[in-house]
Amino acid sequence: MATGECDALIGGDLVVSAGAKTLGLMQTGRTKAVVNSHEIITGDFTQNTEFTLPTDRLKVSLEAKLKGDVSFFDASDLAKTLMGDLYLFQHDVVRCSLAAGHNPA
């Protein structure tokens, strides 16, 4: 996907969704996003047990790029309630995307 060509982002986590590479694929006024707000710990925690995700900063980055076209909700709780297993749910989403001819990356 080229810079600015993302029409829709279904963000599995804030860190990747608000990352520079992902933000570069988005375009204000074009891209709409739904992002999982559940805090998923990163590998940084193994080096620093006091590490906390900069959740507010990540959300602000997405909001600044997409203005009113981004929504946040705890998709992890929803997946666990509906599927019973978050990782199985993620696997099924990717599998369905590939089957539909989409690249979920």
Image (cartoon, rainbow, N blue to C red):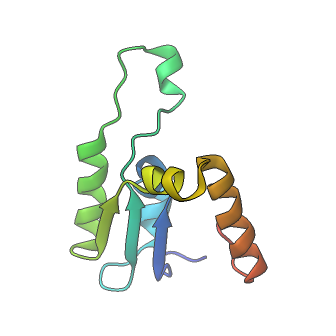
- Left or right of 45? Residue 60 is left
> Which residue corresponds to the image point at 64% horizontal and 48% vertical from the top-left?
87
> Which residue corresponds to the image point at 39% horizontal and 40% vertical from the top-left?
39
Would you place residue 5 above or below residue 95 in this image? below
> Which residue corresponds to the image point at 57% horizontal and 77% vertical from the top-left?
2
The N terminus - image quarter: bottom right
Q: Position of residue 70 (x, y in %)?
A: 30, 70
Would you place residue 4 above or below residue 105 in this image? below
> Which residue corresponds to the image point at 63% horizontal and 56% vertical from the top-left?
90
- Say how many tags the image has: 0
- Left or right of 71? Residue 44 is right
- Left or right of 18? Residue 25 is right
- Left or right of 96? Residue 69 is left
Q: Residue furthest right?
A: 99
Q: Position of residue 41 (x, y in %)?
A: 47, 33
Pick whichever, 99 or 7, lies toward us: 99
Q: Position of residue 101 (x, y in %)?
A: 75, 83
Pick whichever, 19 or 96, lies toward us: 96
Inspect this view and state whether residue 58 appears.
yes
Pick whichever, 10 or 86, lies toward us: 86
Q: Position of residue 55 (x, y in %)?
A: 30, 42
The C terminus - image quarter: bottom right
Would you place residue 82 above or below residue 76 in this image? below
Inspect this view and state whether residue 13 appears.
no
